[in-house]
Image (cartoon, helix red, strand yellow):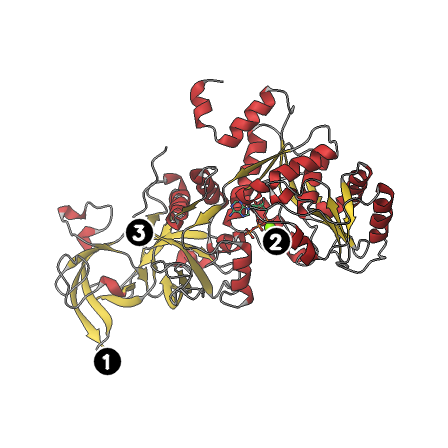
Amino acid sequence: MDNTEMVSKNFIEQIIDKDLEEGKYDTICTRFPPEPNGYLHIGHAKSILLNYGLSQEYNGQFNLRFDDTNPTKEKTEFVDSIKADVAWLGADWKDHLYFASDYFDQMYEGAVKLIKKGKAFVCDLTAEEIRAYRGTLTEPGKESPYRNRSIEENLDLFERMKNGEFPDGSKVLRAKIDMASPNINMRDPVIYRVARFHHHNTGDKWCIYPMYDFAHPIEDAIEGVTHSICTLEFEDHRPLYDWVVRELEYVHPPKQIEFAKLYLTNVITGKRYIKKLVEENIVDGWDDPRLVSIAALRRRGFTPESIQMFVKLCGVSKANSSVDYAMLEYCIREDLKMKRPRMMAVLDPIKLVIDNYPEDQTEILDVANNLENEEMGSRKVPFGRELYIEREDFMEVPPRKYFRLFPGNEVRLMHAYFVKCTGFEKDENGNVTVVHATYDPETKAGSGFNGRKVKGTIHWVPAKEAVSAEVRLYENLVDEEKGVYNEDGSLNLNPNSRTILKDCKLEPSFGDAKPYDSYQFVRSGYYCVDAKDSRPDALVFNRIVSMKSSFKLPKPE
Ligand code: ATP
Ligand code: MG
């Protein structure tokens, strides 16, 4: 391997390279271990694509494992949504789909093994007492009076815990490690508790459940995971992870590696925070397009490719930092730029009548779908006497540097002719209702405009053939300027996070738009057919992202 390649590798790849070189592992296995207690979000996408990407890069294995050892908050609805989201992102677990709850027997056996080695004991202290005995960061903990129970007594009590002889919370199994350890996680942590929960997979078979720090390393070891990649908050738990796999004497123990979570500046990401927005009806469900859950991003019109690009740009690091949402927007624009047709849609329509154009005439114009990508072919757009244009493309009294329509001014109608504004009509409230113009037949698109030039070009749709649609515009859920929270801790919600435009006019080619189809609306942005609310005769579009951006790619380090 040459040097330049080494330098561009992230710290996890460097660890893997070293492990393979030293023969620690022959091949690698990574996993994504979601707890099925909510929908996945953009942060999880980072973890999924990182783990899956490494398995691909090293020709290894990738497991999708549901970490379903805490039955209180778990639901099968979440199992299904998580599978759909991981598959959509392109991370293929093949037949490596696992449930931690399938290992409950092995975890129980592991606990028995620890007891037999004198490394675990049944403790009768209450949760409160255990906390008080634990000590603090500066003071060592105190040993439990039950710590020196005999192996026989521990085996007997643990079995009876399993058999349901003790009430919930009355006894726990604890690892016997070191109450004076500077790392609080090592002070005889609880590894099993008595709790009568109905489990979505194992039903009522168990009334004792393992704790995360004990269960997770066992899950990894059973599956042959080599590199167990998690986020930074587990760094202090690593000694316990290593202790568990060592004491249980796994031949090829997995290795835990931590990386920094992905945060988006002023965007609500954490699962429990998104859950709160859903439960308090601040948004319309987990797939509300204003959220950054994977389901919401998909519905909004983001593509797996755009999220892959985003995650790649974010990189992998050990230092927590926050990424600008504009970078995600950059990625979706980049992804759709060459792939999607550029069509005309008028969001706030006003009529334009071309008075010198024959009343009963319609021309069918052949319009390129994407000028930067010829392969995308062309479509037909009818042109006639009556069109719709954007209300903001006409002004009765224009400010300086306004090059669009105003009385006496000439503009180019995209793909069609030059038109000159000759007048307008108003209703009784003074609102402009119709703009009048004349066209110059010598300036048809493709003709060279008869050598003439104008400063402004505007888009339009034919009035008679237009398709009506609802268009939903989105902004950040919280007010960017003020941040996510107010001083009193409440959410600083942006009242304009969703704007619904009811009677937008689109060119007729939109007639066959299907759920998840996305398009560039010229001069405006990228839009996607809403998969939930759109109907063939009542189209609904989500704005994915607007065209404008001041975002610049960060310089490579
Ligand atoms: P949240 O912090 O949003 O509640 P979680 O960590 O509780 O999420 P899990 O289902 O336990 O959610 O996580 C599954 C995996 O996803 C874990 O390995 C976790 O470290 C990783 N993960 C969660 N959030 C992020 C994030 N923001 N960035 C990167 N990885 C994440
Ligand atoms: Mg969690």
In the rendered structure, which disc, 2 or 1, sits on the residue that comes first in sequence?
A: 2
Is 441 rendered above or below residue 57? below
Disc 2: which residue? 81
Q: Position of residue 23 (x, y in %)?
A: 63, 20
C-alpha distance separating marks 2 and 3 = 33 Å
Left of 372 or right of it: where is 430? left
Disc 3: which residue? 548
Give the secondary structure at mark 3: loop
In this orientation, which residue lies closer to the viewer: 249 or 10?
Answer: 249
Which amino acid type is shown beneath numbered disc 3?
Lys
Residues packed near mark 2 inside 10 Å, few (<14), some (14 to 19) or many (20 plus): some
Which amino acid type is shown beneath numbered disc 1?
Asn
Residue at image position (15%, 64%) is 398
Residue at image position (63%, 55%) is 37
Marks 3 and 1 close (CB-CB < 8 Å) = no
Q: Position of residue 76 (x, y in %)?
A: 68, 56
Left of 411 or right of it: where is 491? right
Which amino acid type is shown beneath numbered disc 2?
Ser
C-alpha distance separating marks 2 and 1 = 51 Å
Residues packed near mark 1 inside 10 Å, few (<14), some (14 to 19) or many (20 plus): few
Residues packed near mark 3 inside 10 Å, few (<14), some (14 to 19) or many (20 plus): few
In the rendered structure, which disc, 3 or 1, sits on the residue that comes first in sequence?
A: 1
Which of the 4 image quarters holds residue 555? top left
Q: Position of residue 178 (x, y in %)?
A: 68, 40
Marks 2 and 3 close (CB-CB < 8 Å) = no
